[in-house]
Amino acid sequence: MFLIACFVLGVANFAMHKAVMESGHPFVEDTKLYFGRHFGRNGSYMVEFILLLGALFFAHANSGLMFGLYAGYTLCNAIAAWMLLSRRM
């Protein structure tokens, strides 16, 4: 059950990530320049993917604590995406 829920949270994280990256917000544009210099154009997606892989690995081992941490990470992403997309920040 943790594995399926973790996968769904990962899909939500990638959707939020893409929406924020395409928003044109000045903070995001500056961050893209930084990541582009050090990690390539899709570096932030690679970081997101690595986090998802780690969460899926621990979810497969039935680690409820790690699932809770990944769910908390998703909640933080949702709040940040809402703030950036609604121009509250």
Image (cartoon, helix red, strand yellow):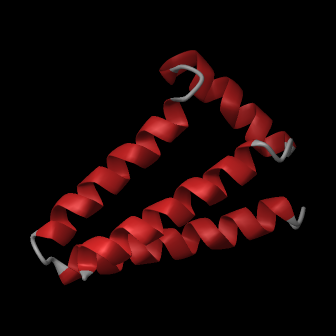
Task: For residue 12, say whether it is visible.
Answer: yes
Quadrant the C terminus occupies: bottom right
81 is higher (above) or lower (below) than 42:
below
Give left or right: position of 8 versus 19: left
Residue extending farthest left: 61
Could you tell me which residue is drawn at 53 percent across and 38 percent down? 44
Quarter that holds the N terminus: bottom left
Q: Position of residue 81 (x, y in %)?
A: 71, 63
The answer to which quarter of the image holds residue 52 is bottom left
Residue at the right extreme? Answer: 87
* Residue 70 spot, x, y in % from top left: 37, 70
Counting from the top left corner in percent of width and height, residue 16 is at: 64, 59
Front-lying residue, 15 or 32: 15
Q: On the image, which quarter does residue 58 sit in? A: bottom left
In this image, 76 relative to 48: left or right?
right
49 vs 12: above or below = above
